[in-house]
Every structure is written in structure tokens, then in C-alpha cells.
Image (cartoon, rainbow, N blue to C red):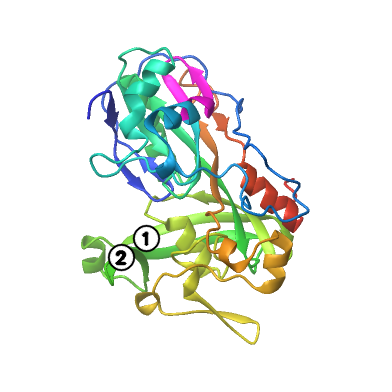
Amino acid sequence: MGGHRVLGHLWGGWWRGHGVSAACQVGGFCTEARHQLHPRGSSNRSRSLGNQPFPGLLQPENLSREELIAVLRASVVDQKGPLVTLNKPQGLPVTGKPGELTLLSVLPELSQSLGLGEQEFQVVQASGKETSGLVLLSSCPQTASRLQKFFAHSRRAQRPTATYWAVTDGIPATSEGKVQAALKLDHVDGVDLVVPVKSPSRKDILEGVKRTLSHFRVVATGSGCALVQLQPLTVFPSQLQVHMVLQLCPVLGDHRYSARVGTVLGQRFLLPAESTKPQRQVLDEALLKRLCLTPSQAAQLPLHLHLHRLHLPGPRPRDAPTELLAPLPPYFSRTLQCLGLHQQ
């Protein structure tokens, strides 16, 4: 692809890469975000924002190549040694078809603009297209290998390394717990969707069904919604979105899977995943009022799922893991304020 290498596959919330060689010595990883994009003309949260209901939300498809590079440069969380960490805007795909504007397609120019010259970037971890948050890049194959081995070992030991924030339409029945589900990719009416599988057989597992696991913790509640901390312990496309649907609490802005949650006389229930087509998320009138949104604006609501924290190994083998943090997008923070959801 020129100017970058891809390690592994993009699966919904993040990249899962593969190691390539022995480790090289790197400086400390620990950092907190230093940059956050602030939209022009954002309004007070207590009133309707007219044509700008989602402050800070970018439309990458409307950006030129140069504008996207400037956005990514401004979203750098940390640059230390061979590692560069970005706070990716929602809606930006990591990869795509030839000729499409993606993160991978502009990595060579981004490397130049960050003063790294012709060094080849590798994507180590990344949030998916509809998810905002951390992207971890490395210009050192040995560092990338070391990180991938750390992530793989952590998964085997059931230690979460990624923490997401999500706003859900609905409040989970328990304040914390885990979601376990066997999932498969299915082609439904020309659309690739993730479908739960009950009691998968050995044949199902061999044919691509995967047992998945996520931890969740409710951080705050208000207006029938919740701020939820999510920590996946497996990697599968749209895993966190589907897991929250199984809790009858779809992520706000989930226009792909939220239709699987039906309501009759105020009681929620699951509709059959195989026969439920994706549609724009429908929010009740009271929630629309709290969010200061019209129904047409709600149909454009971005997915409120943000890769907020990554745990990384310390600079030396015996050092404790450190972490990278990415601030929430402005539209996400606005939603928290409108709903009275306060981070603790």
C-alpha cells in the first residue's frame, strides 16, 4: 500500500494485529490526551443547535485529502519514539476500497507532516469506522510485535486492555456484569450483519461462529439512558453493539442493530435477529426533547461508542502496564450533559 503496513484485521471496535519480530526498546507509553477537536460555532447545550445538533462531528467523505490530514494531525494524542496515537473522529474508516479516502490512504502524508519522513506506519489498534477514539500506530515492526504479543497474552488471561464509553438507550438490568454470546457474520438482504447463535455446535465454530465476551459497568443513569463502560475480552465485528442489544439497551446512534429491540406496553423484548432489517434508530419523544433533537436529526445521530482507554505494557518487561487516554468527542459530551449523565 505504500507508506504503511496493516497488522491483522479491523473487527468492529478495534484492530487485532499479529506480531512480526522481536521487541525493540521504547520509551514509556503512559500519556493523556493533549488535543481535542473543538467545532466552530458550537452552541450552548441547553438549547437546540439548529443545523448543528452534533458539535464536533466530522463528515470525512466531504473532506479533501489535505483537510483530513490536518484533522488527523490535530487529533494526535501522543507521539513518543516509534508510537503515534490518534483520537480518530467518528465516521472515518481505517481501510476501504482503492481510491476511497481512509486513514490508511493518508498515512504516508501524515507521517511526513509529523516529521517522520518516509518511515512506514503500521496500524496496531484502531476503533472502527462508526466508533470514535484511539488509534495506535507504530513505525517500528519490533514495537508493533511487542504490543501485539501483550494484547494476545492479555486476552488469553482474560485481562481487558481496551475500555470504551457508550451511551445506551435504556438502562441495563444490573449495574455491572458480563455478556457472553456466540456470534456469526451473516448476509441478510444484501447487508453483512452480526447474528447471535444459540448453543453453537462444533461445526458452527469451525464455520466461523465465535464465542464472545464483554464486561460492562454502568457509570451513570438519567432520562432512561445510561453511560456504560465496556471492556471486550474477545474481538468480533460489532461485538459491543450486539452485546448491548442483547441487554435490551442499544447504543445511542446504532442504526444497524437497535431495531432488534422491540417495545410493547413499555416492556422491551428481542426480535429475531435473522429477520429484523437494519433501520434508523427510533427514540421516544421524551428522549428527543432532552437531546433537543427533531426526529429527522435523530436519524443522523452518530454512534455513541468511544474507545477511551488502552492499556499498554511498560517500557521494560517488569514494569506495570501504562495507559493511553482519548477525550470524548464534543457531540458525545453534549449528549452526556443533556441527559445529566456525569462521569465519576
User: Of the residues shown, which amino acid type is indicated by label 1?
Assistant: Arg
How many C-alpha atoms fall within 10 Å of the one at disc 2: few (<14), some, or many (≥20)? few
Res 224 visible: no
Q: From the top left corner, tell me how far across and down residue 313 is, in percent.
A: 48, 27
**For this view, does 187 lie left or right of residue 59?**
left
Q: From the top left corner, tell me how far across and down residue 118 is, in percent.
A: 30, 14
Residue ID for mark 2: 191
- Res 119 quadrant in image: top left
How many C-alpha atoms fall within 10 Å of the one at disc 1: few (<14), some, or many (≥20)? some
Q: Nearer the viewer, residue 334 or 270?
A: 334
When the figure is inspected, residue 143 is found, relative to residue 292, above or below; the finding is above
- Res 55 quadrant in image: top right
Q: From the top left corner, tell me how far across and down residue 238 is, in percent.
A: 41, 56
Q: Which residues are magenta?
A: 72-84
Mark 1 and mark 2 residues within 8 Å of each other at the beta carbon:
no
Q: How many marks are shown on the rendered structure? A: 2
When the figure is inspected, residue 28 is found, relative to residue 217, above or below; the finding is above
Q: From the top left corner, tell me how far across and down residue 247 is, in percent.
A: 55, 68
The residues tagged by marks 1 and 2 sit, at their Cα atoms, a distance apart of 22 Å
When the figure is inspected, residue 13 is found, relative to residue 296, above or below; the finding is above
Screen quadrant of the C terminus: top right
The local secondary structure at tag 1 comes to: strand
In magenta stretch: residue 75: yes
**For this view, does 16 lie left or right of residue 319?**
left
User: Of the residues shown, which amino acid type is indicated by label 2?
Assistant: Val
Residue ID for mark 1: 211
Residue at 35 percent across and 20 percent down: it is: 139
Screen quadrant of the N terminus: top left
When the figure is inspected, residue 51 is found, relative to residue 58, above or below; the finding is below
Residue at 37 percent across and 65 percent down: it is: 182
